[in-house]
Amino acid sequence: MTDHTPADALQAIDWPAIHATLDAHGYAVLPRLLSTQACGELVALYPRRGYFRSRVVMGRHGFGQGEYQYFGYPLPAPIGALRTGLYPRLVPLANQWNEAMGIDVRYPSTHADFLARCREAGQSRPTPLLLRYEAGDYNCLHQDLYGEHVFPLQLAVLLSAPGVDFAGGEFVLTEQRPRMQSRAEVVPLAQGDAVIFAVHHRPVQGTRGCYRVNLRHGVSRLRSGSRYTLGIIFHDAAA
Ligand SMILES: O=C(O)CCC(=O)C(=O)O
Ligand SMILES: [Fe+2]
């Protein structure tokens, strides 16, 4: 979508189809959400420390191997626009999921109002991030929970070109169903593709009513090259 703004790209998406896919599988891919050029511009931010509030070396925390940096406020324009523009498209599904899971929380229709709710609970630090993996690096299965307030869907955009910039490094999701063994799903992504996925859990309709499955996501080991990702999480983090 080289000549389109993020707002145009979001406008062109068939959201009912995305919601149906998220309901069925817990994740959905938005092909070519970002152009090759936009991906390159985001990767180029990585060494520019002024954009970021903190850097995490994953190996120091047992999170895997590789590193990531959280953006500070104000977010770079394309990231802020994506976060603000995506949120209202996901609210109807987030509210349906909570209703189906018997969770009382409902989400306000604008991201500004949801961030205000986060802030009142002490969650005021921005969570969008850039991740960088080199050969041998990986991201252990995890959930991006940063406090009491959680928006149930998040997004990751692959900024590098698989097969060109790197090999291996697949995006992986696992689902743990109650009293059952976990199931893994590998999500093939091209450069600029985004995957929307459940942060924590999602409802699944069974023969005897609705149950919750617990999701985790991570990245398999990079065989070679380097791989960058943009992560967009809608709740902010506690200090
Ligand atoms: O690098 C990836 O594909 C996964 C990034 C991630 O864990 C996230 O965006 O929350
Ligand atoms: Fe994550």
Image (cartoon, rainbow, N blue to C red):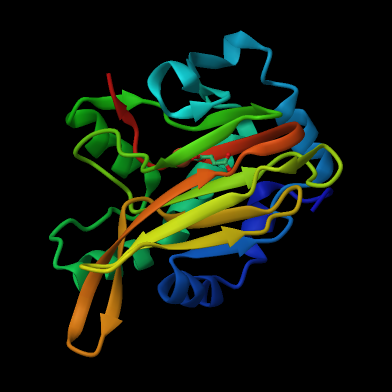
Judged from this view, the residue extending furthest toward the right is 164
Judged from this view, the residue extending furthest toward the bottom is 207
Q: Say which residue appears at 74% left-offset and 56% top-offset.
A: 32
Q: Quadrant of residue 121?
A: top left
**Residue 234, position in %: x, y?**
40, 42
Residue 227 showing in the rendered view: yes
Task: Please give left or right for residue 13 compared with residue 111 in the image.
Answer: right
**Residue 107, position in %: x, y?**
27, 55
Pick the residue in front: 97 or 107. Answer: 97
Task: Please give left or right for residue 6 compared with residue 139 in the image.
Answer: right
Q: Is residue 212 above or below residue 109?
A: below
Residue 72 showing in the rendered view: no
Tell me the quarter of the image containing the C terminus: top left
Q: Is residue 5 above or below residue 50?
A: below
Q: Say which residue appears at 67% left-offset and 66% top-offset.
A: 12
Q: Say which residue appears at 29% left-offset and 33% top-offset.
A: 146
Q: Say which residue appears at 66% left-offset and 48% top-offset.
A: 6
**Residue 10, position in %: x, y?**
62, 58
Pick the residue in front: 232 or 181. Answer: 181
Q: How many marks?
A: 0
Q: Is residue 67 above or below residue 15?
A: above
**Residue 30, position in %: x, y?**
64, 61
Q: Quadrant of residue 65?
A: top right
Q: Is residue 173 above or below residue 150?
A: below
